[in-house]
Amino acid sequence: MTQPDHELDVRPILAEGGEPFGAIMEAVATLAPGQGLRLLAPFKPVPLFHVLGQRGFEPTAREIGGGDWEVIFRPTAQRRDTVAVEADFPASHGSDAETWPEPIAELDNRGLEPPEPMVRTLEGAESLAPGQTLAALLPREPVFLFDELKARGYLWRGTFVPEGHYRIVIRR
């Protein structure tokens, strides 16, 4: 017998000015095999579709009135039931075995509205000399930035930090 979907309403978190990503990932981590997540949000959380899609979930979204959305994330057949959260950099484009130099700069892009975090991060990356690294703290996982970095030939490593933000280290 399958378990009912776990329900998470992030509307109060967002109404208080908080970032719900940490609560969402905690909820996903507690799901039983085969269990889905029912998420209630004041907007359609499209970037989350990609994030949870990479973790083996398929979204079904519907507007429920007043601009609010219900999204049910169901596990797919190929869902990995264990996620390597202990890894320093669970998302990367580049060799994980190689040691990277310390970043020459740290950008804090958390308080900016899109697309400013991506623009500032790309500008910082452009200033790097070959072999140098740059770190950036972002308000969420930069799914669109990943494609830009890859297209421009950069390597990167990224992870969520405990406060719910995303830290990326970029290497030229």
Image (cartoon, rainbow, N blue to C red):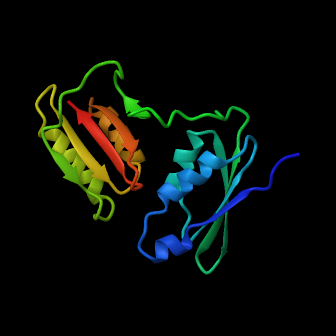
Residue 124 on image: x %, y %: 17, 45
Up-down relation of residue 20 to residue 151 (above or below): below
Say which residue appears at 16% left-offset and 40% top-offset.
126
Up-down relation of residue 16 to residue 118 (above or below): below
Judge from the rendering whether residue 141 lies leftward or rightward of residue 100; answer left or right: right
- In the displayed orientation, state which residue is furthest to the bottom: 66
Location of the C terminus (image quadrant): top left
- In the displayed orientation, state which residue is furthest to the right: 1
* Quarter of image, res 66: bottom right
Say which residue appears at 27% left-offset and 29% top-offset.
153
* Quarter of image, res 6: bottom right
Name the one closer to the observer, 130 or 28.
28
Name the one closer to the observer, 34 or 44.
34
Judge from the rendering whether residue 135 lies leftward or rightward of residue 59; answer left or right: left
Judge from the rendering whether residue 137 lies leftward or rightward of residue 128; answer left or right: right
Residue 102 on image: x %, y %: 17, 33
Name the one closer to the observer, 11 or 128.
11
Up-down relation of residue 150 to residue 17 (above or below): above
Residue 53 on image: x %, y %: 59, 43
Q: Count the marks: how many?
A: 0
Say which residue appears at 24% left-offset and 52% top-offset.
119
Say which residue appears at 13% left-offset and 35% top-offset.
128
- In the displayed orientation, state which residue is furthest to the top: 97
Up-down relation of residue 83 to residue 7 (above or below): above
Residue 113 on image: x %, y %: 31, 65
Location of the N terminus (image quadrant): top right
